[in-house]
Image (cartoon, rainbow, N blue to C red):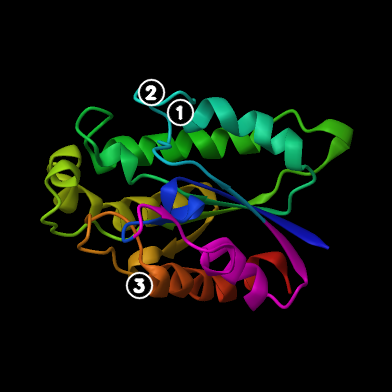
Amino acid sequence: MKTVLCYGDSLTWGYDAETLGRHQFENRWPSVLQESLGGKVRVIAEGLNGRTTAFDDNLADCDRNGTRVLPTLLETHAPIDLVVILLGTNDMKPVVAGSAFAACQGIERLIALIRHHDWSFDYDAPEILIVAPPILCETANAPFAAMFAGGIEESAKLATLYRDLADETGCGFFDGASVAVTTPLDGVHLDVENTRALGRGLEPMVRMMLGL
């Protein structure tokens, strides 16, 4: 059975802006992706609220820097056939990085970590699929609006930058905004319908990259 590792932030964790909790397991996009693939693939969800691509954010009692945690997770879940990276939203925070360009640099670093990882048991390096997160939207939620100030404009640049990076590095690319939109409840996260739409939307690309 093929194995897919979904490496992301709260969009992958399944944060629900309506309940301030977590979407039901079956509604989170990695779960929907696995269901869409008809049981032929094991999809592992590694989502953490607040995770960045490669930048420190010390406002939680866990390590949100994606570059420091990824190598351990690669070993934990090996062998892996495909890593799906859905990160960059939290890089839009001014206190973290505040720009799409910085997020793209972070994604490039994650790609290098995967490609040059010292794989145990001579496992082959997995394929990589870069997913641009859905664009941030306007919200009346004052804390989130302040937290992601300037993020709408910057997040709109991610798809183009990520697509170019994917072409340069030989990775797959998918634009999350092509199938999902963020909720105005906080301007950042996905409601049930849109997180499920993301899982369904990724299925053809994942199927192609796995040779299914």
Residue 37 appears left or right of 130: right
Q: Any magenta on residue 27?
A: yes
Q: Any magenta on residue 103?
A: no
Name the outermost residue toward the front. Answer: 19
Give the Cα separation between the discs numbered 1 and 2: 5 Å
x, y (%) of residue 150?
12, 44
Residue in the image at 43% along x and 41% along y: 49
Quadrant holding the N terminus: bottom right
Residue in the image at 35% along x and 63% along y: 190
Quadrant holding the C terminus: bottom right
Amino acid type of the residue that numbered disc 2 sits on in the rendered structure: Asp
Which quadrant of the figure has residue 41?
A: bottom right
Residue 167's place in the image compared with 7, above or below, is: below
Q: Which mark is residue 123?
A: none
Whichever of callouts 3 and 1 sits on the residue coming sooner in the sequence is 1
Q: Are marks 1 and 2 in contact (CB under 8 Å)?
A: yes
Nearest the viewer among 12 and 15 is 15
Amino acid type of the residue that numbered disc 1 sits on in the rendered structure: Asn
Give the Cα separation between the discs numbered 3 and 2: 29 Å
Disc 1 designates what residue? Answer: 65
Nearest the viewer among 166 and 38 is 38
Q: Residues within 10 Å of mark 3 (few under 14, many from 20)?
A: some
x, y (%) of residue 105?
38, 35
Residue in the image at 43% along x and 48% along y: 10
Whichever of callouts 1 and 2 sits on the residue coming sooner in the sequence is 2
Instruction: Magenta stretch: give its range.
Output: 19-43
Q: Which mark is residue 178?
A: 3
Q: Which mark is residue 56?
A: 2
Amino acid type of the residue that numbered disc 3 sits on in the rendered structure: Ser
x, y (%) of residue 211?
72, 70
